[in-house]
């Protein structure tokens, strides 16, 4: 390829494929380059295989409620871990295949190889130099693993390797209690594995509200030992791996490192762009355009380390794909922040986080699900939801929760925040009975009680009845 291309996309993950869809609408003078397996992080090692494992774990864990429901014989059930993992891989392979289809038909325009930037309009791959008017960097991420831990060999797992195991050992430690760590620690424990969880932080799953953190850690800690606030140190011993954190010391068969993911920008050649890089080696990226400084380069997805969530990553890919085919970039308004952890109960953060609020101007409403009717009927009566509203206008600002059906209520709240709805306006909407969302209404009513009364009822007033129509 001696001619200058319109666009080169580097990376074929969720962001790269979203960019590809937009680029292909506008030009055929492009290539997409990928280093390593084709198929998205989400499909291969992230969202989808992890949720498949979680579903199996929760199905088995459900046996603990059978006696209460009058169903006998739960103690006869056992998990077949190899069969569970085979199903995870079978479904995973299907998810991956669907993402690979997007690039299979591209022929020579899909290139496997490692890229190094040479200038803002040039790069090298497989010893060949390519030029383009615009370049999109969407190189994804990889698990964070301290270098010293690599000496543990096969006893050290990450989500990149966990789902490839034929079976799982009897004792495991999970180090890191962010979203991935919380999900996997609970799932592994529910499958009958003896799990010990560790985190150097005092919080879990990205929560910032102290009361929600307290409930979440109490519920998780009732299922497996949860050690927070001390950095974990690992060392190989004769019968496994020793994990030390403060005064806590346990020996396990293997360790799942869940310390987050690191952008794949090493040796990419970002230093050749002629712009300052931060201490992590990251260039400045405009979140509204995905453009790197004022260069003809765009950076999307996990590679820019801004919002490593699939819906955000896909949006960034679309934005980069559109702007890479324009003479001038368009600014896009990003969606309301939404993060969900698929634990039980669900953990979710919507809109403004508790720690980011001006608490002098913010009202808080909450509900505990211990006594909530539908939750009790389903043996799901645990958790808390906290809502935040502007004290002056009553407009909903955000929420944090560890609550049943949290993944669904979080979407309702995101919609409400996006539409700038007030607490009173939300209370005018119908809440069916009996549903878990009645808990959300309880939290809204605790907020409404702190606001000026605007009506005698949640219902909107209408005019006087037109008696003349009866004459």
Image: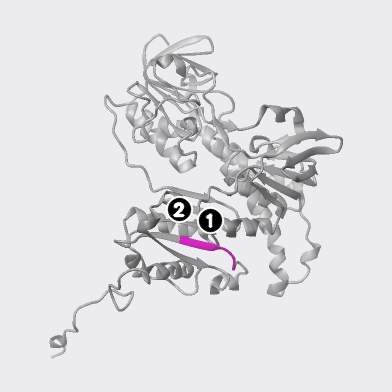
* Quadrant housing the N terminus: top left
Residue 134 shown left or right of residue 175 in the figure:
left
Closest to the observer, 100 or 300: 300
Q: Quadrant of residue 312?
A: top left
Q: Which residue is mark 2?
A: 354
- Number of residues whose C-alpha sits closer than 10 Å to that of mark 2, classed few (under 14), some (14–19) or many (20 or more): many
> Along the horizontal axis of the image, is 424 left or right of 339?
left
Q: Position of residue 373 (x, y in %)?
A: 54, 74
Name the spot of residue 188 as percent of width and height, x first: 70, 49
Q: Nearer the viewer, residue 291 or 358?
A: 358
Mark drawn on residue 210: 1
**What quarter of the picture does the C terminus occupy?**
bottom left
Judge whether 417 appears above or below 113 on screen: below
Mark 2: which secondary structure? helix
Residue 40 higher or lower than 435, as above or below: above
Q: CA distance from mark 2 to mark 1?
A: 9 Å
Q: Nearer the viewer, residue 384 or 114?
A: 384
Q: Residue furthest bottom?
A: 471
Q: Label for residue 412? A: none
Q: Is residue 216 visible?
A: yes
Boundaries of the magenta span? 381-386
Numbered disc 1: secondary structure = helix
Whether residue 317 appears in magenta in the rendering, the answer is: no
Where is residue 445, by image quadrant?
A: bottom left
């Amino acid at each position: 390829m001696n001619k200058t291309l319109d666009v080169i996309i580097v990376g074929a993950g969720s962001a790269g494929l979203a960019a590809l869809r937009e680029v292909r609408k506008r030009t055929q003078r492009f290539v997409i380059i990928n280093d390593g397996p084709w198929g998205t992080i989400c499909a291969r090692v992230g969202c989808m295989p992890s949720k498949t494992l979680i579903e199996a774990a929760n199905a088995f864990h459900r046996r603990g409620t059978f006696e209460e429901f009058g169903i006998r014989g739960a103690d006869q059930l056992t998990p077949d871990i190899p069969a569970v993992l085979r199903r995870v891989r079978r479904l995973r392979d299907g998810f991956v295949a669907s993402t690979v289809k997007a690039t299979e038909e591209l022929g020579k325009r899909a290139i496997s190889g490692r890229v190094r930037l040479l200038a803002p309009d040039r790069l090298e791959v497989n010893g060949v130099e390519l030029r383009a008017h615009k370049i999109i960097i969407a190189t994804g991420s990889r698990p964070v693993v301290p270098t010293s831990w690599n000496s543990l060999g096969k006893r050290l797992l990450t989500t990149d390797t966990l789902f490839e195991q034929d079976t799982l050992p009897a004792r495991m430690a999970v180090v890191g209690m962010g979203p991935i760590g919380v999900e996997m620690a609970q799932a592994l424990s529910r499958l009958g594995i003896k799990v010990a969880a560790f985190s150097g932080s005092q919080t879990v799953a990205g929560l910032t509200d102290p009361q929600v953190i307290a409930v979440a850690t109490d519920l998780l800690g009732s299922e497996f030992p949860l050690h927070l606030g001390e950095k974990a140190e690992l060392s190989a011993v004769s019968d496994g791996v020793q994990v030390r954190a403060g005064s806590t010391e346990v020996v396990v068969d293997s360790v799942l490192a869940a310390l987050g993911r690191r952008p794949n920008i090493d040796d990419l050649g970002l230093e050749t762009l002629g712009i300052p890089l931060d201490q992590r080696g990251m260039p400045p990226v405009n979140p509204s355009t995905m453009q790197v400084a004022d260069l003809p380069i765009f950076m999307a997805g996990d590679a820019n380390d801004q919002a490593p969530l699939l819906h955000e990553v896909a949006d960034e890919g679309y934005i980069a794909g559109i702007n890479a085919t324009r003479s001038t970039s368009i600014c896009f308004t990003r969606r309301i922040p939404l993060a969900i952890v698929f634990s039980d109960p669900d953990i979710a953060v919507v809109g403004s986080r508790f720690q980011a609020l001006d608490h002098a101007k913010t009202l808080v409403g909450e509900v505990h699900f211990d006594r909530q009717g539908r939750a009790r009927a389903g043996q799901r009566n645990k958790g808390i939801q906290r809502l935040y509203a502007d004290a002056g206008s009553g407009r909903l600002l955000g929420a944090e929760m560890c609550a049943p059906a949290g993944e669904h209520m979080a979407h309702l709240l995101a919609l409400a925040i996006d539409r700038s709805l007030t607490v009173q306006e939300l209370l005018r909407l119908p809440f069916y009975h009996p549903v878990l969302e009645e808990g959300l209404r309880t939290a809204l009513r605790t907020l409404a009680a702190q606001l000026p009364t605007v009506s005698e009822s949640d219902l909107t007033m209408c005019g006087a009845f037109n008696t003349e129509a009866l004459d």
